[in-house]
Image (cartoon, rainbow, N blue to C red):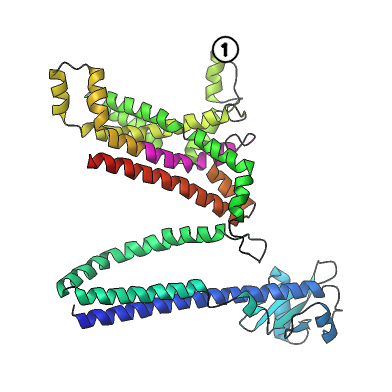
Amino acid sequence: MSLRGFRIGVVVAASAAALLLLGGVAARDGRRRLEARKTEALEVARALQGRVQPGRLLEPDLAREIGAPRGLAVTVSWGGESPAAQALLDSLRRDEAPRASPRTAVAPLKDSDDWDVIGVVSVSALSSDQARVLPWRAGTLAALGLVVAAAVLLLRWGARTTERSRRETLTAWTFLGLPLLHLVVFSLVPVGFTLYLSLHDWNLVSAAKPYVGLANYRELARDPLFWTTLRNTAVYVLYVPITMAAGLGLAVWLNRRRRGERVLRAVMFLPYVTSAVAIAIVWQWMFNPDFGLINAGLRLLGLGPVDWLGSPRTAMAALIAVTVWTQVGYQMIVFLAGLQGIPQSYLDAAIVDGASAWQRFRHVTLPLLRPVLLFVLVTGIIGGFQVFTLVYLMTEGGPLHSTDVIVYRIYQTAWEFLRFGSASAMAVVLFGVLLVATVVQFRLLGRKEAA
């Protein structure tokens, strides 16, 4: 590609990006403007409820009395004026939902008993539109500035590089473009939106979503239940070293040629690929205090039944046991791959030097398995902090919040209490914890490779 063609391509791409950005901002502001119109119409309809007699026109003094903003035109129709007005009234009677267009918004006017829709309130020329929706904001200007800066840097880079280098780079980005776009849309944008929500009092009940800064985070710091969920999550993550020890032991045992080795591997790995919902339902039945299989075995031993999921002392232990049973097969397979990657010559040299089986395992196998151990440890901790399905289906965070973990608390805060701002703040805290764990993983593995 020639330098002139490259410059033209950069200008076209930057212009398209700017147009897409402005179009997205315009669409967002248009949606907000329509929502503002609907809210205004509903507020006026509620203020007029019981104050206008059916069939009568709205008096101008009454519109001013209810506090209608200056320049807001308010009218009331009763359905008999025209077939279109009657159709609109019938439609509002069916769903009672306000409608909005770029110029006018309508809302149902109910009777004094709040039972039936008797008229249609129409509002237009909303003076509060511009106060609620500002089409140009600092974020939009900053994004446009980034687009222009990127275009300038690309033009300067194209002027300094050869035609072959530009062709190879553009070819590479042609293949990377769609995966990068997928990553941005489905990963980076949700993360950014979560950060935005965490700084606002955002819920689905109120139309107002004010900026509150770090208030959600301060509320979490003062919430004892949030710290309880973090403690419970940390306790639950203790399954990781238990599972690692069991998985490593099974891997060492199955690493040798023995009869039925492949069948045993498949049987141990099967729980990991089974549906988590099915596992939770089956184990919930097995832990049942009345007819569960585990308590039936305890009765045969004369130990009596135990309310595994109904007691705060045993509920978390039961969840950990189910998780160990589920994850041990996966970790066994990972350790098997690590064991089979160890050169046999190292072990043979240790045998020649007279090392016992334990000494070979301690001084040869374990040091060479260190990258695998770190990988399993860190990924296990990350997975432990994200547990949700078992808690949701087996205990619902109980009893007495003894199994209430952070992801389940995020779900409840967002979708049951409709407090998306607080839930997003919890998600950001969780993201910070997982980020620290990931950084530790890369630091330790990188240090080992460098050594």
Q: As drawn, is 416 to the left or to the right of 19?
A: right
In the rendered image of this protein, does residue 364 appear above or below residue 382? above
Depth check, front residue: 218 or 208 = 218
Callout 1: 10 Å neighbours few (<14), some, many (20+)?
Answer: few
Q: Amino acid at mark 1?
A: Gly
**Horizontal and vertical percent position of residue 333:** 31, 34
Q: Position of residue 42 (x, y in %)?
A: 72, 72
Q: Residue furthest top?
A: 302
Q: Residue at x 54, y 40 (%)?
A: 230
- Write down the quadrant of residue 63 in the picture: bottom right
Classify mark 1: helix, strand or loop. Answer: loop
Magenta residues span 377-401
Residue under the image location 20 percent in, 74 percent down: 160
Where does residue 205 sit, x and y in percent of width and height?
Answer: 67, 61
Q: Nearer the viewer, residue 304 or 8?
A: 8
For residue 166, side relative to residue 398 (left or right): left
Decide whether residue 71 is among the magenta residues. Answer: no
The location of residue 426, given as percent across then percent down, is 55, 49
- Report if residue 383 is visible in the image: yes
Quarter of the rendering occupied by the C terminus: top left
